[in-house]
Image (cartoon, rainbow, N blue to C red):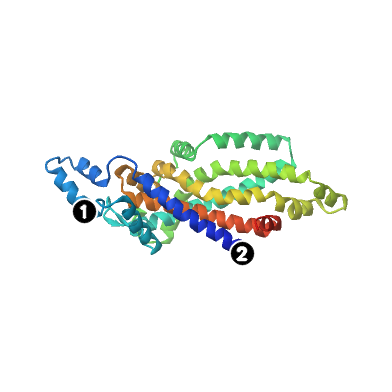
Amino acid sequence: MKSYFVRRLGVAVITFFLASILIFFIIQLPPGDFVTYAISQSGDSAGSAQVAEKMRQQYGLDRPVYEQYFRWIGGVVRGDLGYSFLYKKPVMELIKSEFLWTVIITGISFVLAWAAGMFIGIYSALHKYSIGDHVFTFLGFLGLSIPPFFLALILIYLLISSGYGIAGGLFSSQFVNAPWSLEKVMDLMKHIWIPIAAISLSNITEVMRIMRGSMIEVMSQPYIMTARAKGLKKHRVIIRHAVRIAMNPLISLAGLLAPKLISGIVVTAVVLNLPVMGPTFIQALKSQDMYLAGAYLLLTVILLLAGNLIADLALGWSDPRIRLDSK
């Protein structure tokens, strides 16, 4: 297991550096840079060439791209994500609170989507072609066709129509800058379920469909029939034998679901006015604030690699055949 972990960790590290190169150079592809954006926003074209040259020297944008990359990735390795040109703050300071809220919302959404989707998938597989299975299948296809941000709009419309009085954000206006208290926590509970519902509901269906298909396939395997023929109780066969093997595709999916939830929250955050990574990331792309945009993309890559590494280890632990075949 130790050598298996070392191999997977080595692949993750190599992938991280290759992804960082791709991210940095893709950000450089659009014409112009942050200086071009800043001058166009100021509307002062007089002496713009001289001003632009001074700003590029100040921000280090006059240096070769490869040199800018090595300065950036060197800082990333030391824990320094760079400096935001747009907000004039260190990137780490700027995204610290936003990343925390992003992890909280997506983490809860991930757990809900995984648990509920797995439970519904098991039920549908054990009651194949029943009325309940057809209902969940219909809802599953419906959920796959509705993006999270559109589901958030539907929830807002329903809440406003019912007089709920909450349309977005994580806090009411009087609690946004207030110190933490029991009242602020209760106000948070009234708001945070909306983005969690919008994000998790759209992912429950994917988990459900995968679990259903995997469970149906496993239940038809000879060793399940043998266990049933030996007189083992049905719930024991299902839990100890069928579910454990049927979960393998879900464990693989779990490694991909974290970055998918992050990308799903970007537009949803704009719709619901959430203090998460989405709106700031979009603004960073529009203004070509390369270090800020690159930090967000790099964090998404880290989540993807961490999720895949954990999924690989979980698969190796749950199914020794995978660990042995990878040698």
Residue 273's place in the image compared with 73, above or below, is above
Q: Residues within 10 Å of mark 1 (few under 14, many from 20)?
A: few
Horizontal and vertical percent position of residue 38: 23, 45
Number of disc labels = 2
Horizontal and vertical percent position of residue 70: 35, 57
Which residue does the image show at 62% across and 66% down from the upper left?
Answer: 2
**Residue 184 found in image quarter:** bottom left
- Is residue 284 something one can see in this rendering? yes
Q: On the picture, is 1 further left or further right than 75?
A: right
Secondary structure found at label 1:
helix
Q: Residue furthest bottom?
A: 2
- Upstream in sequence: badge 1 or badge 2: 2
Going by the numbered disc 1, the residue's amino acid type is Gln
Which residue does the image show at 23% across and 46% down from the upper left?
Answer: 35
The residue to which callout 2 is attached is 3
Horizontal and vertical percent position of residue 17: 45, 55
Secondary structure found at label 2:
helix
Of 156 and 2, nearer the camera is 2
Q: Which mark is residue 95?
A: none
Q: On the picture, is 61 further left or further right than 280?
A: left
Of 51 and 222, nearer the camera is 51
Residue 201's place in the image compared with 81, above or below, is above
Which residue does the image show at 22% across and 41% down from the upper left?
Answer: 41
- Is residue 102 something one can see in this rendering? no
Q: Residues within 10 Å of mark 2 (few under 14, many from 20)?
A: few
Q: Quadrant of the N terminus?
A: bottom right
Going by the numbered disc 2, the residue's amino acid type is Ser
Cα distance in 3D space between marks 1 and 2 = 47 Å
The residue to which callout 1 is attached is 57
Of 216 and 288, nearer the camera is 288
Q: On the picture, is 125 further left or further right than 261?
A: right
